[in-house]
Image (cartoon, grey):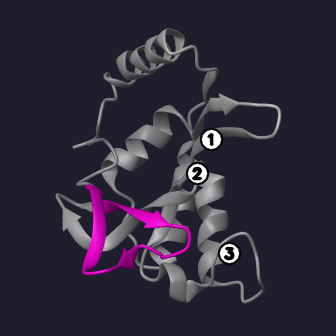
């Protein structure tokens, strides 16, 4: 079953209200919907590394082919602190598959051994949410937190975030 994402506008409004109350600069922008061809190309890239394209993730990209949320927590003369969270578009997912699994050169992503068998789908300062085919619920790969330095598995297992892209 595909997600409807009827909850998304309410969550964005709540996020904007909290930012106003805390006087935090915040931006949210969502891309236009992915085409069926873009979704098919993304699914083919994920299939190359045996990561299922979860129905709720596909539904989100069908509605918004990626999105970005930025906020500034601290602004001082000597430094600024904030974060930008990027939900990868189909093109960014395809690029991540290529960079993480099929490019031996040093690049923005860590080498395959860092990610295998997961793939990053959301960039969160300073880490990623990854889609993990080792845990499947109703056709959905689990979403895990991956620290940029430690990778998606560390300690006594994984940092589990959600059953699907929607929940």
Q: Which residue is mark 1?
A: 84
| Residue 69 in the image: above or below residue 130 | above
Quarter of the figure that contains the C terminus = top left
Residue 26: x and y, percent? 61, 23
Compare residues 20 and 39 and report the one nearer the observer: 20
Query: Residue placed at 65% from the left, 75% from the top?
Result: 98
The answer to which quarter of the image holds residue 106 is bottom right
> Which mark is in front, 3 or 2?
2
- Disc 3 to disc 2: CB gap under 8 Å: no
Tell me which numbered mark, 3 or 2, is placed earlier along the sequence.
3
Label 3 Cα crowd, 10 Å radius (few <14 / some 14-19 / many 20+)? some
The answer to which quarter of the image holds residue 23 is top right
Tell me which numbered mark, 2 or 1, is placed earlier along the sequence.
1
Query: Residue placed at 57% from the left, 85% from the top?
Result: 112
Instruction: Give the magenta part as a residue range.
Output: 142-161
- Disc 2 to disc 1: CB gap under 8 Å: yes
Q: Which residue is mark 3?
A: 99
| Residue 58 in the image: above or below residue 16 | below
On whether residue 144 falls in the magenta region, the answer is: yes
Q: Is residue 81 left or right of residue 118?
A: right
Spatial CA distance of label 1 from label 3 is: 21 Å
Spatial CA distance of label 3 from label 2 is: 19 Å
Label 2 Cα crowd, 10 Å radius (few <14 / some 14-19 / many 20+)? few
Label 1 Cα crowd, 10 Å radius (few <14 / some 14-19 / many 20+)? some
Q: Which residue is mark 2?
A: 125
């Amino acid at each position: 079953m595909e997600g409807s994402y009827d909850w998304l506008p309410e969550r964005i409004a709540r996020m904007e209200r909290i930012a106003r109350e805390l006087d935090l600069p915040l931006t949210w922008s969502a891309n236009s919907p992915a085409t069926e061809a873009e979704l098919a190309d993304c699914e083919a890239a994920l299939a190359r590394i045996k990561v299922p394209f979860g129905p709720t993730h596909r539904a989100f990209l069908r509605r918004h082919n990626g999105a970005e949320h930025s906020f500034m927590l601290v602004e001082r003369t000597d430094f600024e602190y904030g974060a930008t969270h990027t939900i990868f578009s189909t093109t960014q997912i395809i690029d991540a598959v290529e960079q993480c699994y099929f490019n031996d050169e040093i690049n923005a992503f860590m080498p395959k051994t860092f990610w295998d068998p997961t793939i990053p789908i959301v960039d969160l300062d300073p880490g990623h949410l990854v889609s993990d085919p080792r845990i499947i619920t109703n056709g959905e790969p689990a979403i895990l937190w991956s620290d940029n330095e430690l990778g998606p598995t560390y300690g006594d297992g994984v940092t589990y975030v959600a059953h699907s892209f929607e929940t």
